[in-house]
Amino acid sequence: MTQNTSPYKLSRSETQHGEDGQHHLIKGEKGSVRLWHNEEPSADADKTMHKHDYETLGYVISGRVELMIENQSIALEPGDSYCVPSGAEHRFHILETLTAVETTTPSAF
């Protein structure tokens, strides 16, 4: 298999998985793109509020997820976009098998 050396393209075979199961798609100078693909609901997952030093912008492709952020509960369904600002305490609770794409600035990987 030939490795892609272009800074403009990353082939599917070159993607990596993050520690939480996300697919790290591509990383630029200031941000990155990741995919959550067919993430299953879990009664135990994502119960702890946490925060990151990066902003997350996302789009729900399929499934349903509850985003808890800044004492608000936000229902997300296919076609919904969301923003988690840098430093905001939040958690996601997957309600129905989820596929979503996210960008992070700065990069999360």
Image: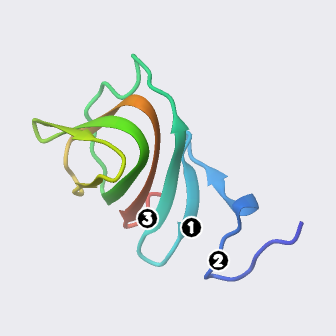
| Image vertical order of residue 48 relative to residue 4, above or below | above
In-image side of 12 versus 70 (left or right) = right
Colour scheme used in the picture?
A: rainbow
**Tag nearer the camera, 2 or 3:** 2
* Contact check, label 1 and label 2, Cβ < 8 Å: yes
The residue type indicated by label 1 comes to Ile
Using the image as rendered, state which of residue 26 and residue 101 is in the foreground: 101
| Image vertical order of residue 74 relative to residue 12, above or below | above
Q: Residue tagged by mark 3?
A: 107
The answer to whether any part of residue 29 appears in the image is yes
First in residue order: circle 1 vs circle 2: 2
Image location (x, y in percent) of residue 59: 37, 55
**Tag nearer the camera, 3 or 1:** 1
Label 3 SS: loop
Image location (x, y in percent) of residue 44: 40, 17
Q: Can you tell which mark lies on residue 26?
A: 1
Image location (x, y in percent) of residue 101: 45, 55
The residue type indicated by label 2 comes to Lys
Alpha-carbon span between mark 3 and mark 1: 10 Å
The residue type indicated by label 3 comes to Ser
Q: Residue tagged by mark 2?
A: 9
Residue at horizontal 89%, vertical 66%? 1
Furthest toward the right, the residue is 1
Residue at horizontal 74%, vertical 80%? 5
In-image side of 75 versus 33 (left or right) = left
Using the image as rendered, state which of residue 78 and residue 56 is in the foreground: 78
Label 2 SS: loop
Around disc 3, counting alpha carbons within 10 Å, would you say few (fewer than 14), some (14 to 19), or many (20 or more)?
some
Around disc 2, counting alpha carbons within 10 Å, would you say few (fewer than 14), some (14 to 19), or many (20 or more)?
few
Alpha-carbon span between mark 2 and mark 3: 16 Å
